[in-house]
Amino acid sequence: MRDRATIEARVLGVLRPVVIIVLLVATIFPFLYMLLLSVRPIEQLLQDPGQLWVPPSEWTIGTYQEVLTSVSDGGQGFLRFLANSAIVSLAATALTLLVSIPGAYAVSRLRFTGRRQVHFLFLSVYLFPSILLAIPLFVLFTRLGLRGSLGGLTIVYIAQTVPVSIYMLRNYLSTIPESLEEAAAVDGYSRLQTLRKIILPLAAPAVMANALYVFMIAWNEFLFALLFLVEDRADWTVSLGLAQLSGGIEVSKTVLMAGSVVLTLPIVIIFFAAERLLTEGLTAGAEKA
Amino acid sequence: MKAPLTLRQRENRAGLAYLSPTLIVVLVVVVAPILWTIMLAFQRIRLINLRRAGVFGDYSLANLELVLTSPGFWSSLWTTVVYTVGSTFGSIVLGLIAALALRGRFRGRTLVRASVLLPYVAPVVAVTFVWTILLSPQFGLVNDWGMRFLGWDRPIAFLSQREYALDLLGWHIEIPLALLTVIAFESWRYFPFAFLFLLARLQAVPQELEEAARVDGAAPTQNFRHILLPQLSAVIALLCVLRFIMTFNKFDDVYLLTGGGAGTEVVSVRVYEFLTARFDVGAAAAQALVLAAGLVVLLVIYLRFLAPKVEGES
């Protein structure tokens, strides 16, 4: 048995670094390639698609200029799309938190009728395909005149993110000792005051992680943006704009790569800035599963 | 007697009040639409005559009949199942490998662990676009290198070729190329999700267990099989359910990669086609409903017969 253990340990000792490197290349390479293509002149890509590295002297930022300038100035108008995405995502984040913080507090602390059943309601958000929700919402928003408005889209995003947000926050809130609240009650704090002045400051890291997570979901979302905003180019989000333009042949691929970088960069920055917060918030409770 | 009762009632009321914004949003934007879909599915409605559609419409089974007998429906349901099972399996296996490889200490571990999560957090439109460019037969890096270094005689259209003839050891096999590519993409994009959960669970395994096994001379594979795997089984079962549900309903990835062509037409993409190309709201709703029903049936089968362990362990 000793032999088998030593042999295996030796094999794994070699295999492990190899696996780590393969994983790293597989996950990072597409993003580096995106970055590289975005600064390459298109003719050069078509001539030699297999060339990986292009000396910095040949790099161009013309792609970024084209993708960001407005349509009236001959560009692709991604600056406008960025603004749309930012408005929708920020609004969705703020409103989701406004709704989910009291919700999470209620679910984690207060005993009320139907508390146990609430989870089934949340499950329905994920059990039914979003395309199924999309049909009636498409119809309803058409009737209300909300289709083609960023506000309508924001409402849908709130509904999509509130359950997961409550789940993440609840896990955190349940770690805050209840004695703190009792002490606050003795000091004459009302429930709302306790939530605002005691619980919220303590839960700040979880709330922050949550905000970033919701922002990322809203920023990355595609299906509802496609269904609701596709008709008017002025309303497009970055994801939608990129998807709509990448199907055609009018816009060169390197310009669209610049668009991809513009779409991805905010997410990557947020992610690396708050990676620990995010992963801990997401997997809280998994240890016990 | 009276005072604690009112306290309890007040708590009850506060609980409902605090949760009410959530309830309203979920009821209006999720539950009501689901109920409405069910009604739409049983009425012949197109987008044009939608205005007169109401609760008291003409109910019929015409949509269901149309959908269930329409050409391509059953094959698309089958495609959905294959796509879901393949991607669920692929992402969990990759995630497990990653979690095991990145568990121990090494230099730069934090950075590597974070980088591995990139496919999961990056916008789907951007990553599908990079994949289509990389795999493109005209100017894709993969095909260029494949022909240059691997001796392919012509570029392979990974995303638009339904069948690819492969000669393997004298056997002639047709493999569903585009579908496999989409499954590979899905596994790549979601293995970080499995990785996160598995790693979190791995770190909670008591060190003494492995220590004891090592002292007893257990090889790493035995350690994995008898110590780690039992500890992970509940998380793996949970991941199977989560990934299955999410992939089964997935729309964006397939739509953006292939548009549902070349044998990759999953049901959600078909629903979208019915809705936007044919404006047939009724048939689209009926199809979405069949998709949801299919998911529920498969989940029940899974929870009933294939995952009896979970209940016992949790």
Image: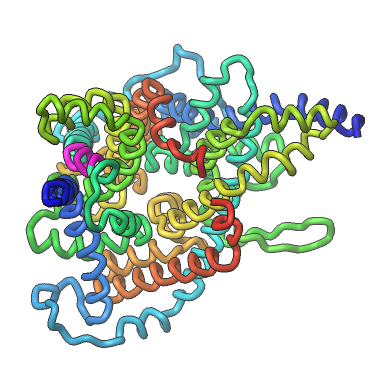
Kindly indicate the quadrant of the structure image that contains residue A272: top left
Image position, residue B185 (x, y; %): 52, 46
Observer-nearest of B109 and A218: B109
Query: Residue B165, relative to residue A198: is it above or below?
Result: below
Q: Left or right of A20: which side holds A231?
A: left
Image position, residue B235 (x, y; %): 55, 46
Q: Left or right of A118: which side holds B265?
A: right
Query: Residue B117, relative to residue B245: is it above or below?
Result: above
Magenta-highlighted residues: A97-105
Image position, residue A257 (x, y; %): 39, 32
Q: Left or right of B50: which side holds A105?
A: right
Observer-nearest of B263 and B8: B8
Residue placed farthest to the front in the image?
A: B1
Observer-nearest of A174 and B204: A174
B68 in the magenta segment: no
Image position, residue A16 (x, y; %): 71, 28
Q: Residue at x 53, y 32 (%)?
A: A27
Magenta stretch prevailing secondary structure: helix
A98 in the magenta segment: yes
